[in-house]
Image (tube, rainbow, N blue to C red):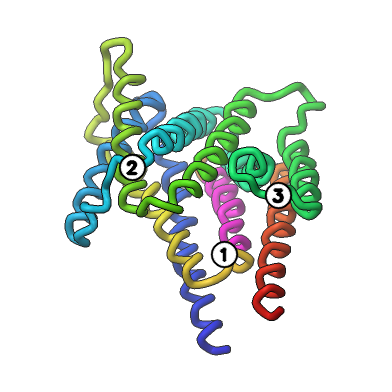
């Protein structure tokens, strides 16, 4: 029992790193948006990420794991993530932090919806209930019946779909490809995509020395956040990790309120809670089934 409690505390520590990293990346993205467009942000982020991946893989002697196996699947995964991340950075400039993060919590719902078609997974009754409950939460967050869809809502919703497709393709890749390989192609392919998109007009802006820190935070924050989530999931089940991850919402809402004069919208918080409950219903059900199989 003590060992289990200790692992939960360790998982909470790693999830704190995730919350700080994602929040810092959101603030940095908004601060740098006045100087760089989303493609330029992605380009500099990918450069920093690629350097980190190459250095760490060299130190850990895992560079031999980088192969051209499943290259087309890598491309689909990175095209999805690149599209989603660009839309995320764009939406940052248009809607409150909390509203964007609420949309992010809908990613598992889109994964559940697409999994039967792309992964061959069964759409169970519990998953159908989770999806329906989750989309009620999304409607509350967006409230299209008030004054139509506000600017930034559509990019935020589409970024969640892009991230969901990325999750599905990543799940396929992890069956045969190492994490080092996935991260190498993530940073290198998205660097190429960003250079093409940022330089199509023949001009690529350089960050000023005063804003360079925001680019560094974005570059490190993304990789660090996903590393922390992975470590947390290695120590504790998703039923423990997911509620901790949800703490991102009040944290970013407080940052938006204190530093960017964003209102604490009860509908956004309430809708996000419903989305969280929808995700948790499915996670609890999946975990319970695994326990029953082991005990049975």
Q: Nearer the viewer, mark 2 or mark 1?
A: 2
SS class of the residue under badge 1? helix
Q: Examine the structure image and report whether residue 104 is included in the region drawn in magenta.
A: no
Q: Nearer the viewer, residue 27 or 261?
A: 27
Identify the residue position indicated by label 1 in the image: 241
Q: Quadrant of residue 40?
A: top left
Q: Position of residue 125 (x, y in %)?
A: 81, 52
Residue 262 appears in view: no
Q: Is residue 295 above or below residue 76?
A: below
Left or right, residue 209 beside residue 140: left
Is most of the magenta stretch helix, strand or loop? helix
Q: Is residue 213 above or below residue 176?
A: above
Q: Quadrant of the N terminus?
A: bottom right
Cα gap from disc 2 to disc 1, whole angstroms:
32 Å
Q: Quadrant of the C terminus?
A: bottom right
Q: Which mark is residue 122?
A: 3
SS class of the residue under badge 2? loop
Identify the residue position indicated by label 2 in the image: 69
Lower position in the chain sequence, tag 2 or tag 1: 2
Q: Nearer the viewer, residue 63 or 218?
A: 63
Crowding at dot 3, Cα within 10 Å, few <14 / some 14-19 / many 20+, comes out as few
Cα gap from disc 3 to disc 2, whole angstroms:
28 Å
Lower position in the chain sequence, tag 3 or tag 1: 3
| Residue at figure coordinates x 46%, y 57% from the top left | 18
* Numbered label tally: 3
- Magenta residues span 242-258
Left or right, residue 126 beside residue 154: right
Crowding at dot 2, Cα within 10 Å, few <14 / some 14-19 / many 20+, comes out as few
Cα gap from disc 3 to disc 1, whole angstroms:
24 Å
Residue 139 appears in view: yes
Q: Residue at the bottom extreme?
A: 2
């Amino acid at each position: 029992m003590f060992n289990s409690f200790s692992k939960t505390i360790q998982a909470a520590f790693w999830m704190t790193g995730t919350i700080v990293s994602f929040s810092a990346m959101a603030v940095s993205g908004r601060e740098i948006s006045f100087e760089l467009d989303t493609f330029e942000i992605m380009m500099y982020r990918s450069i920093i990420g690629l350097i980190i991946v190459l250095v760490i893989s060299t130190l850990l002697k895992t560079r031999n794991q980088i192969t051209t196996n499943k290259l087309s699947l890598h491309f689909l995964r990175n095209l999805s993530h690149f599209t989603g991340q660009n839309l995320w950075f764009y939406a940052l400039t248009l809607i409150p932090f909390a509203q964007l993060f609420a949309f992010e919590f809908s990613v598992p719902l889109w994964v559940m919806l697409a999994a039967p078609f792309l992964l061959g997974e069964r759409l169970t009754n519990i998953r159908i209930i989770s999806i329906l409950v989750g989309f009620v939460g999304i409607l509350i967050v967006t409230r299209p019946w008030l004054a139509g869809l506000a600017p930034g809502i559509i990019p935020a919703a589409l970024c969640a779909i892009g991230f969901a497709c990325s999750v599905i393709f990543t799940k396929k890749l992890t069956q045969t490809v190492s994490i080092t390989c996935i991260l190498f192609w993530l940073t290198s392919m998205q660097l190429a995509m960003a250079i093409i998109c940022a330089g199509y007009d023949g001009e690529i802006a350089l960050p000023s020395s005063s804003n360079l820190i925001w680019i560094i935070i974005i570059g490190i924050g993304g990789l660090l956040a996903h590393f922390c989530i992975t470590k947390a999931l290695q120590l504790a089940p998703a039923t423990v990790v997911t509620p901790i991850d949800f703490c991102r919402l009040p944290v970013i809402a407080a940052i938006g309120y204190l530093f960017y004069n964003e209102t604490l919208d009860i509908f956004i918080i309430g809708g996000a809670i419903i989305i969280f409950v929808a995700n948790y219903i499915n996670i609890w059900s999946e975990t319970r089934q695994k326990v029953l199989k082991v005990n049975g």
